[in-house]
Amino acid sequence: MNIIKKHPVNKLGYNFIEEKYIPAGKDEYYLRNIQNTVDTVYRKLTSQEIEVLVHNRNTSDNWDLIFVSQSFNAELVKNCKFFGLVRIGNLEPLYLEFHNLRMSVGLYNSTIISCDFGDNVCIDNVNYLSHYIIGNEVMIANVNEIATTDKAKFGNGIISEGDAEDSRIWMELCNENGGRKVIPFDGMLPGDAHMWSKYRTDEALLDKFKEFTQQKFDNRRGYYGKIGDRTVIKNCRIIKDVTIGTDAYLKGANKLKNLTINSDMERTSQIGEGCEMVNGIVGYGCRIFYGVKAVRFVMASHSQLKYGARLLNSYLGNNSTISCCEVLNSLIFPAHEQHHNNSFLCASLVMGQSNIAAGATIGSNHNSRSPDGEIVAGRGFWPGLCVSLKHNSIFASFTILAKGDYPAELRIPIPFSLISNDVANEKLVIMPGYWFMYNMYALERNSWKYADRDRRTDKIQHLEYDYLAPDTINELFDSLQTLKALQPNEEGNAITTGWENTGRETEITKVPQSIELFTELIRYYGTMQLLQHFLKNKFASFDDFKKTLSAKIQRSKWLNIGGQLIQQTEMEGLKRNIKNNKIKNWQSVHEFYIIQGDKYYEDKLHHAYTSLLEMLLITPRQFTAARFIELLQEAVATRTWMCKGIYESRAKDYTNPFRKMVYETTEEMNIVTGRLEDNSFIQEQTGELETLKKQVKSVTKKINL
């Protein structure tokens, strides 16, 4: 049966903190007084004000515990029930308006238990408002319950005084069996979640992460919920143990429980109709609308959930959007797109700049006797319509999968590949370098798009969006070894095994072309980084330029840590420093990210230089001015065919008769789709090519002086 406890009504609003958890010499309001940082001077009500309040059908168990500011207007409080200590700021005869919601300043038709209010708030028809500190010009209308309990953690996976360890909230990332679980916390970055879920054999490191998280927050009982200045809440049902920043907008949500909702003047967060969110962190500038369900989650800043999306036991990286889909037990790095109904993503590590198409089921089938499989996908992962994948699978960067039901686990080590399931001929087909050969427009535009849409204002982690970067270049080097070991036929195709967990053949197409392409891309990457270094520093001569290049000849290994590329040696140093107490908290870990971001230009330059030397099979001494000029001319040639590919891959959409057939005339097509000649992205790329030519000409002139 339901256990209903009975207490004297005069105790309602008091004893928020159990007496045993209140420090000596303190009262139950000591944490509340710390949280309420306003400098308002409160006073008791006058007898005349009490008379006005009673006349306006207000009640209180103790009018002496209602404190108000000097500019309090009792006429603006009507039909409210007050319990416990309540403090009210200025109330002036005004009304506030937000998105056509117009409300009179004051407190009306509400039950209020032990709360603090800022100046000129609008509170109307809140059935139960308990233990909250509410800022200035906050508007709250038609809410069933807004309450905080004495053990509120606001979505952070900590335990309060007296709590059992098994009450701690965890997020079970990357694996449904909980073997990679992490503790969510406000301020958790993608890199934090990745390190914690990845390095599972290092128990000392995992213990430190748990310690960092627990010490980041005060475990004392009795913190109140907070609603920041200018936040608007209307037509919601249950808001419990939720702290909300300034300028947030909540409308029509069904249930919000145990959350931190970050929001401020520049990065406003919004939660809309029908949403239900429990045990999580909402980052700055997030948008959550229309029937979203989220449980045990972290949404990094400027991410979105829309149209019935479900996010469970998952971390969603910055600048990402999930609509109409189901995502479970996944760690998703920044710049992820998943817009379509019935897409399914489960038990996966998706490393950014990804796009999941409609009907894709990523990890829907487990191939063991328990749900413990995983999928790991590098940057630029793009499974096509209705792709079905099996655990365990792993994909190199910028893998695109053609529509199909892939029957077994896949191991795809070559980046920029198109994967096809050739059912008719019973084989798996891999086309390395597909993006550069047939879809250069999408590849280049995606890199530009993700950088252009990075709305973060607090860029602690430096995110890499370029498709040619240390991680993909290292993959290209490994791929060249793999491709050169194959024996292609006259058509340039080769048969191999070990890429799919079946007995059927895997065909690698265009092997010679891929080898030539990957070699050219590495040379292009190295040359372009050196050119940008020359231009940035305005060197007067080649000798001055070369003196700044690293004498190292070892190409460095790199890791993708939450979308930030960091050298493996630096990561090993970070782990050592965490375990030997040189790094003592998450703030210091985040400072490490910042330092690595500041060093990235130099580290990437050194990687590019050593990659170039390795590809050319020369030493630093053999890297001469003449060789550099030759490489610059090659880079112009490479960029020229890239720009041509950008144009031609988009032009196909204007010349394909099956695309044109829905239009009566070319004029109609141009009106609907826009003229190819007016495509701003293509124009921008053409302009950049002309700029490159001028830059190369200028640098060549300096070198030849």
Image (spheres, helix red, strand yellow):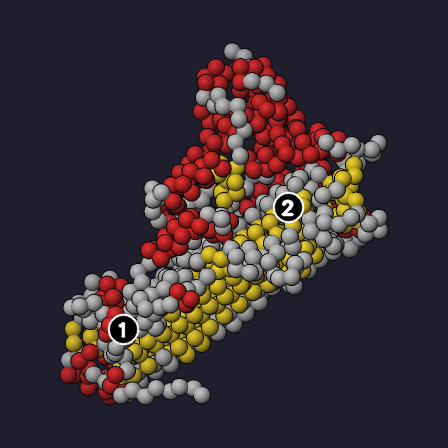
Which residue is depicted at the point 54% across and 63% down?
311
- Picture quadrant of residue 233: bottom left
Q: In the rendered view, does 491 fall on the left or right side of 393? A: right
Q: In this view of the protein, which residue sits in the foreground, 187 or 150?
A: 150
Q: In this view of the protein, which residue sits in the foreground, 429 or 257?
A: 429
Residue identifier under label 2: 395
Is residue 590 at all visible to an observer of this figure?
yes
> Looking at the picture, does residue 144 appear above or below residue 36?
below
Which residue is depicted at the point 49% across and 48% down?
201
Is residue 93 at all visible to an observer of this figure?
no
> Looking at the picture, does residue 328 appear above or below residue 546?
below
Q: Which SS class for mark 2?
A: strand
Cα separation, mark 1 vs mark 2, equals 52 Å
Q: In the rendered view, does 402 fall on the left or right side of 607? A: right
Residue identifier under label 1: 17
Q: In this view of the protein, which residue sits in the foreground, 508 or 502?
A: 502
Q: Locate the N terminus by quadrant.
A: bottom left
Q: In this view of the protein, which residue sits in the foreground, 202 or 117?
A: 202
Q: Which SS class for mark 1?
A: loop
**Which of the marked residues, 1 or 2, is nearer the chain's N terminus?**
1
Which residue is depicted at the point 46% across and 27% down?
536
Residue 513 in percent (x, y) is at 74, 32
Mark 1: which amino acid? Ile
Which residue is depicted at the point 66% across and 39% down?
414
Tag 2: Cα neighbours inside 10 Å, few (<14), some, or many (≥20)?
many
